[in-house]
Amino acid sequence: KNFLSFKYITMILFIMLQVVFALFPGEPLELASGFLFGNFYGTLLCLAGSCLGTFFVYYLVSFFKHKIINLFFSKEKVQEVEQMLSKNKSKFWIFLIFLVPGSPKDILTYVQAWEYKPCTMADHDNTGRIPSILTSTYLSASLKEGDIISALIVLLLTIAMVILGGIYYRYSVKKSNA
């Protein structure tokens, strides 16, 4: 496959812009990527866009500091994430949050730019995004191919992961506020 063709570059740019501007969840673009390019290539395109977006966010935060973060997120939400990070400084903890589909990855990408170098951020952000991206791209690719059973299984597993991840995230927030 020629990843320099317009359609691939466009998808990578859309994913990158989603990470940078954080205006909506990334899952719709991940679903579109899987539907248009299949599970394998859709996943690669999402990871490429996510990695570029993460680097871009790091440099935006480095240059604009809190002004850029406050442009996209409420001060209360930023303080909540900053407080949680200050009590849980583990890279592994951040990685765990990125593993969960539907978790607040965008704000975490911005806030952790204070703590970590861009390669470290890109490493745990994008490695942690793989399960969410895989479930989204596999789901839509399966639907496109007419494999309803596989798509339903992935959908149910994703819903369970989102619920369990949401419970864990809320528990972590309450624990860090205690």
Image (cartoon, rainbow, N blue to C red):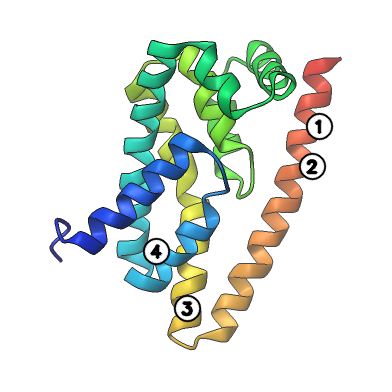
Q: Amino acid at mark 1?
A: Tyr
* Pointer 4 or 3: first along the chain: 4
Counting labels gives 4
Q: Could you tell whether 140 is left or right of 87 in the image? A: left
For the residues labelled 2 and 3, the Cα–Cα distance comes to: 28 Å
Label 3 secondary element? helix
How far from the left and from the top, in percent, is residue 125? 45, 34
Badge 1 is on which residue?
171
Q: Evaluate if marks 1 and 2 touch, with contact meaning CB atoms under 8 Å apart.
A: yes
* Quadrant position of residue 33: bottom left
Q: Evaluate if marks 2 and 3 touch, with contact meaning CB atoms under 8 Å apart.
A: no
Badge 2 is on which residue?
167
Label 4 packing within 10 angstroms: few (<14), some (14-19), many (20+):
many
Judged by depth in the image, the label closer to the viewer, 4 or 2, is: 4
How far from the left and from the top, in percent, is residue 170? 79, 34
* Pointer 2 or 3: first along the chain: 3
For the residues labelled 1 and 3, the Cα–Cα distance comes to: 34 Å
Instruction: Give the residue at x 60% y 50%.
Output: 101
Q: Amino acid at mark 3?
A: Ser
Q: Evaluate if marks 4 and 3 touch, with contact meaning CB atoms under 8 Å apart.
A: no
* Pointer 1 or 3: first along the chain: 3
Instruction: Give the residue at x 33% y 56%.
Output: 11
Judged by depth in the image, the label closer to the viewer, 1 or 4, is: 4
Q: Could you tell whether 4 is left or right of 83 in the image? A: left
Identify whether 3 is placed above or below 130: below
Q: Which mark is residue 142?
A: 3
For the residues labelled 4 and 2, the Cα–Cα distance comes to: 28 Å
Q: Amino acid at mark 4?
A: Ser
Label 4 secondary element? helix
* Pointer 4 or 2: first along the chain: 4
**Quadrant of the drawing holding the C terminus:** top right
